[in-house]
Each structure stands twice: as structure tokens, then as C-alpha cells.
Amino acid sequence: MGVVSKTGIAGLTLGGGWGHLSGMFGLALDNLIGVDVVTADGRFMTANASENEDLFWGARGGGGNFGVVTSLQYRLYEVGPVLGGAVFYPVAKTREVLRFYREFADESPDELVTQAGVFTTPDGVVVFAVGACYCGSVSTGEWVLRPLRNFGPPIADLFSPMSYVQIQSMFDPFFPPGRQSYVKANFLRSLDENAMEAFVDLAGKSPSPLTFGPWLEHWHGAAARVGATDTAFPHRKPSYNFLIWSNWINPSDSEKNIPWTRSCFDAMRPFMDAGAYMNYLEDEGDPLARAAYGANYDRLVALKNKYDPSNFFRMNHNIKPSQPVH
């Protein structure tokens, strides 16, 4: 699953599903065995590796473009306890910690998934944090995480053995329902020195203390070993996903938070790869939606022509049929 427990399971899965276990077991959609779908013309269809295989391929990364997915069947794993938590550093040390983090993350085993970036703690301290989940044995995880926990040293070390359910809920207090939110994200070609300098320039400058970002997710392991065309989700090479997740409470503050979020994205744009993670795109009509489907787009259009030629399911990051039928 993802990293916030309240995230809707269907949208998360159909658009990707990066999370704490993706290095070891892949994305949520990689563990989808089958789906039941109601199509635009009212047909109830089961799609899996042996039935309606084309629809099953498209559902794994094509979102809700082909019908209403009414049930999902998953491959499950026995996991836990995990070694999870985070270390915090002063935001003033972002440059040196980020450089260390890049080397640490690039050597990560599949069992370790990390993310890092800037946020404000509940007591008002702006920090650069590195969060991690190690899903192998806790004793091995202690050894793997020792360099991260000893570097600095950090001003706080919150790692401990915990259940998967606990780490899955770790970010929940920071994303309560009802807040204003605006997100910009994309994959980086690499986290080179120039990209890191641009990242450092953005650190600690958010107009809202509720914002997460600039932020990085490390994509690697099993999620990066699936072929780009094996599912409709094309982003399969090891990389960092850069994001700014701006949050605020008063709607009147939108006029300063949204432009700031866009400016951060623009500052990092020179270092970004083509494409985007669909689950982090903003409103319908986002110009990055086309890029999110990458080289699989034409094949997805053919599926749209077959299963939804009238584009009935269009309130989404839309794949348009080549010749809509009305």
C-alpha cells in the first residue's frame, strides 16, 4: 500500500501504489491478481492474467479510464515487525545530509525504502528528515540503518521495531481531512550536484508550516525491475520522485501557497525526467497527464476505443479515444 493509511485503495492501486514495501514487493498494482470492472455500456467483466487480459493490463496504471473497478484481488505477504521511523536534522544541514542520503539510498537493499525532505515538526522546528522502513529482520535492519542513524548526528532518532500497520499510519497526523492542499511532482533524471543545490535553495522556505517539501521518494528494487510495458505503468527505472505537497488551512492562503509550490517545481524542472506519477497529478486536465502514461499511451488509447469509445469515464487523468463515439 501507500504511506498514508486513509488513501483510497482503488485509486492508489490503479495509478501505481508506491509505498513502504515497494522495494521488496513492487507497487500495489504489481501485486494485483485480478479486478472486477463495470464498463461504460454496463457490462460486468472480470479481468486477470487469463480473462480479458488486455483490460487487466490497462487497469494496472490506466486509472479509472476503462470502467468502475468494483473489487480488487491482491497477492499478499506476511510482513513484520518492521524497523521503521525517521531521523531529523537541522534544516541548515540540508546540503550535507542530502549528499549523504543520496549515497545511502543508492546502496539500499530491496528491504529498505526511504524518503527524505523538509517539514515542520508539531513543535514548530523546521527539519530535514529521512524516513525509512526496513521490512527484513529487525536485527539486520539495525545494521543496515546504522550509518543513517549515526550520521550528523541527528537531533532526533525515532526508529524502532513496529508493526506494518503502525508505519503505514505514521504520516496520518500530518494529513487530516479538510485541509487545503496542492501538489506538484515528477521524477528526476538523477540527483546530481546541480539538482541537490536547487533542492537546498528551496529548503525551509514554504509559506505554510504544514507543507511537506521539497521532498524525495526513492524508487528502486522490485518496483524498478518490472518491464516498462509489462503493465500500463511505465516508470520502472530506479529514480527519485521529487514532490512539493503543500498544505494549509485558510482558503485565503491559497494565493501564496499555490504560486510557491509552482515556483519550486519550476526550479527543479531542469532536472526532471519525462513523465510523472499519475497519483500525484493535480486536477483533471493536468498537462502532465499525457506524459504520465509514457510510451504506453497509444496502447491505452486502443483500449479506450474498445471499452469506452464515448469517453464516458472522463473525470480523471483522461485517456481520450481516438474518435469519440457519442
Image (tube, rainbow, N blue to C red):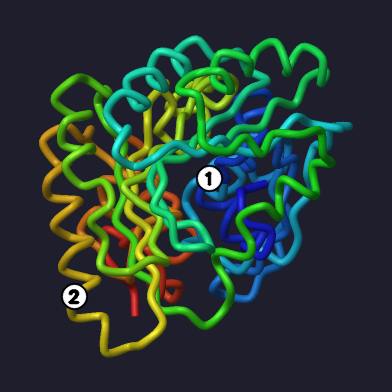
- Amino acid carrying label 1: it is Gly
Residue ID at (22%, 36%) = 274
Residue located beneath label 2 in the image:
256
Residue type for callout 2 = Lys
**Quarter of the rendering containing residue 249:** bottom left
Disc number at residue 16? 1
Q: Is residue 62 visible?
A: yes
Which residue is at a point 61% across and 45% down the rendered structure image? 56
Looking at the rendered structure, the secondary structure element under dot 2 is helix
As measured in the structure, the alpha-carbon distance from the residue carrying label 1 to the one carrying label 2 is 31 Å
Q: Residue at x 57, y 60 (%)?
A: 11
Q: Is 108 or 84 nearer to us in this picture?
A: 84
Residue 259's place in the image compared with 202, above or below, is: below
> What kind of element bears circle 1?
loop
15 left or right of 162 in image: left
* Quadrant of the rendering where the C terminus is positioned: bottom left
Residue in the foreground of this view, choosing between 279 and 82: 82
- Residue occupying image coordinates x 22% and y 20%: 192
